[in-house]
């Protein structure tokens, strides 16, 4: 017993420290292990959330790509557009008939003058032209061909040839023409040469024939 007592006095403190150290290390390791597991669980949860989010984004992109691939390309709009050009106020004289010709019944309506005006052009109608109408065998159908010249307010002469059709019957009254302009190529009105035009005549309640002209775009 004296030996144990002496051993305890000499080594007791060291032994206690060692035991405490071992116990503390074990406990610390236990705490670290618990924290490590919790961290791993949180990390795994974040990975699963990111995986689901990534799967959703990829699916959304694939759906959009498939829709774009399957969608038929939209056809370009080729519907003609009309652009207003001018109005001709044509004064005419009494019509006279040539009679029945090999081509049909010919009627002539003299053009005695008038005026015209549009956003980019203005002037007068030169007297001396005429509307040469041809009545065919079909009742209520007349082909028109007006040939005359106009003069702009800045002195440029332009030739006009306006052809069209007059029909009347069960479908109602139809009167549409398509004028062609011949302007000097070195004038500021040369743009009239390079387009197709449509014209809607209107007799109205006045002393002239109104011809409104649109450019077909």
Image (cartoon, grey):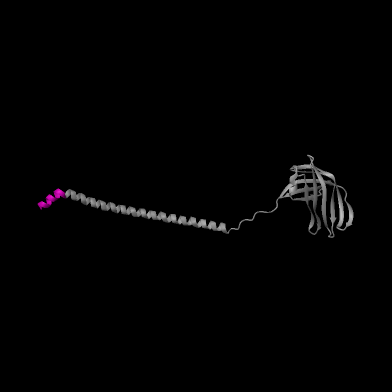
Judge whether residue 15 is colored magenta.
no
In percent of the image, x 44 and y 54: which residue is there?
50
> Between 83 and 186, which is closer to the camera in this rendering?
186
Secondary structure character of the magenta stretch overall: helix
| Lateral position of residue 175 relative to residue 1, left or right | right
Q: Residue 18: tell me if it is visible.
A: yes
| Residue drawn at (28%, 53%) of the image | 29
Image location (x, y in percent) of residue 95: 88, 51
Decide whether residue 8 is among the magenta residues: yes
The part of the chain drawn in magenta is: 1-11
Residue 122 x, y percent position in the rendering: 77, 42
Inspect this view and state whether residue 205 appears: no
Q: Position of residue 210 (x, y in %)?
A: 80, 47
**Is 43 displayed left or right of 85 in the figure?**
left
> How many numbered badges does the structure rendering display?
0
Whether residue 63 is situated above or below residue 117 in the rendered picture = below
Relative placement, left or right, of 16 versus 120 is: left
Could you tell me residue 91's position as x and y percent? Answer: 84, 46
Residue at the extreme front: 186
As drawn, the residue found furthest toward the left would be: 2
In the picture as drawn, the residue positioned furthest to the top comes out as: 154
Residue in view at x 84 percent, y 55 percent: 134
Q: Quadrant of residue 138?
A: bottom right
């Amino acid at each position: 017993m004296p030996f144990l007592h002496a051993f305890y006095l000499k080594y007791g403190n060291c032994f206690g420290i060692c035991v405490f150290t071992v116990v503390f290390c074990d406990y610390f390791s236990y705490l670290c292990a618990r924290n490590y597991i919790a961290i791993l669980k949180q990390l795994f949860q974040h990975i699963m959330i990111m995986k689901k989010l990534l799967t959703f984004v990829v699916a959304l992109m694939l759906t959009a790509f498939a829709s774009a691939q399957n969608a038929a390309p939209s056809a370009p709009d080729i519907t003609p557009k009309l652009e207003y050009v001018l109005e001709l106020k044509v004064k005419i004289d009494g019509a006279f008939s040539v009679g029945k010709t090999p081509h049909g019944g010919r009627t002539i309506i003299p053009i005695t003058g008038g005026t015209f005006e549009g956003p980019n052009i203005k002037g007068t109608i030169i007297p001396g032209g005429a509307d040469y109408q041809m009545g065919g065998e079909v009742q209520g159908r007349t082909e028109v061909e007006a040939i005359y010249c106009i003069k702009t307010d800045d002195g440029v002469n332009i030739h006009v040839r306006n052809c069209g059709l007059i029909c009347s019957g069960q479908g109602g009254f139809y009167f549409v023409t398509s004028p062609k302009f011949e302007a000097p190529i070195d004038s500021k009105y040369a743009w009239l040469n390079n387009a197709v035009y449509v014209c809607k005549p209107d007799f109205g309640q006045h002393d002239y024939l109104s011809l409104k002209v649109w450019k077909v775009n």
